[in-house]
Image: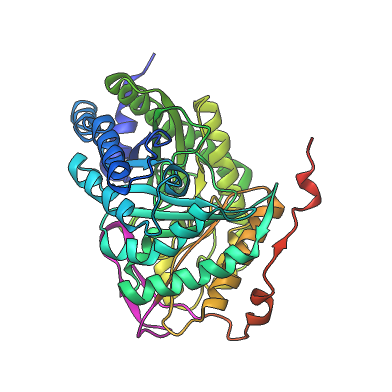
Amino acid sequence: MITTSEILETIEMISQQHLDIRTITMGVSLRDCGHPDVKLCCDKIYGKITRRAERLVKTGEDIEREFGIPIVNKRVSVTPIAIACEACETEDYVPFAETLDRAAKTVGVNFIGGFSALVQKGFTQGDRKLIRAIPEALAVTERVCSSVNVGSTRAGINMDAVALMGQTVIKTAEISQGQGCAKLVVFCNAVEDNPFMAGAFHGVGEPECVINVGVSGPGVVHSALKKCAGQPLNVAAEVIKKTAFRVTRMGELVAQEASRRLGVPFGIVDLSLAPTPAVGDSVADILEELGLESVGAPGTTAALAMLNDAVKKGGVMASSNVGGLSGAFIPVSEDAGMIRAAAAGRLTIEKLEAMTCVCSVGLDMIALPGDTTAETVSAIIADEAAIGMINQKTTAVRVIPVPGKTVGDFVDFGGLLGRAPVMGVNPASPAVFIHRGGRIPAPINSLKN
């Protein structure tokens, strides 16, 4: 039985603490869309997405209006294009990205994910063609997001792919003035049911079509922690856990309702504390509420570990369908507190890397100097992939070398992508290491059978 106090508490979370459904993402399989002819393949892709997702935006808006729950984004993810289009007899995969963009605009979603490749153990011809197309594809489209998985705990790290993705990030930055890099993420241990961009794609083990929901509530957690100020950390962890439970229940409600109305299976609720640039919607503020003078101070990694674990515990109590990434995101440009700390020099890339050992994803939305080399970007990717591989978790890199900018400059990406100070990178060269290529073997903890 839902009590009056619980209803009023939820209303307060929505109206004053930035609680929202960050995204309803429809996953659509394109495995039946392959064809040797480019035009026919594109027509099949466009037709299937627009047919499957034609009611997605309206359904989200109807639920938002009827339930009074903000639903910020409606999105689509598709089978990795390197898989779906590999039978096509073409060297140029940019038309597939343009088709995805056109379909996204037709159905009204703000992003479509899946211009992707999975190369953790090696390349197929389709993988190479897709990666080669990424810079131009992201420059000529508005809503397409791209991801490449270069490593996994089971396969190790494909260092040839790591080197290639460093070059790809630099080229993407050059031809799009950095903007395209905000839509490109490099993964280790990518998950198949992630509803969040830029890394969403519809995994090969997923059903024909599915609804995944991403919930976010940093402001709610921050507000709850204020009520237990000064109390022991185990008390704070319990508060976070109970708050995450309530947030996840709301996500479950919306996901089930969207699934019912669209006639599409419900996949997962992803409870990720995904911040926005808005004041009061910050993961950094949560860490500082726990007692840190500033995010980035000694103790930050410990505080983040506790936060991430408590969020997951609360989520799994609330739903049997928690999945995706589910935890705390630490994107620099999308979190007002992270921006503040980075601008003051209290938060460095090295500290962020340490934090990624215990958070949901990795180095996210970090602006780099325009003269950063491809080898340095590759080495950053390799470091994050190693953290993910050894710790059996998802890690990712979304860094943005900004042409013409140097350390201390600010870059504005607009909207939810926010703004960020350009952060310095270690000047020592990793070039020889990166150019060795090959594969870093899977760790001993991969032998689970």
Which quadrant is home to the N terminus?
top left
Residue at coordinates 28% horizontally, 30% vertically from top-left?
A: 52
Q: Is residue 103 above or below residue 298?
A: above
Q: Relative to residue 131, is residue 64 drawn left or right?
A: left
Q: Is residue 82 above or below residue 47?
A: below
Image coordinates of residue 333 in percent, x first then y, are 38, 65
- The magenta region covers 402-424
Depth order, front residue of 443/98: 98
Depth order, front residue of 189/356: 189
Q: Is residue 137 magenta?
A: no
Res. 217 in view: yes
Image coordinates of residue 254 in percent, x first then y, are 33, 28
Residue at coordinates 54% horizontally, 68% vertically from top-left?
A: 164
Image coordinates of residue 366 in percent, x first then y, are 44, 69
Image coordinates of residue 435 in percent, x first then y, are 65, 76
Residue at coordinates 49% horizontally, 38% vertically from top-left?
A: 203
Quarter residue 412 falls in: bottom left
Q: How is the image coloured?
A: rainbow
Which quadrant is home to the C terminus?
top right
Depth order, front residue of 42/403: 42
Quarter residue 432 falls in: bottom right
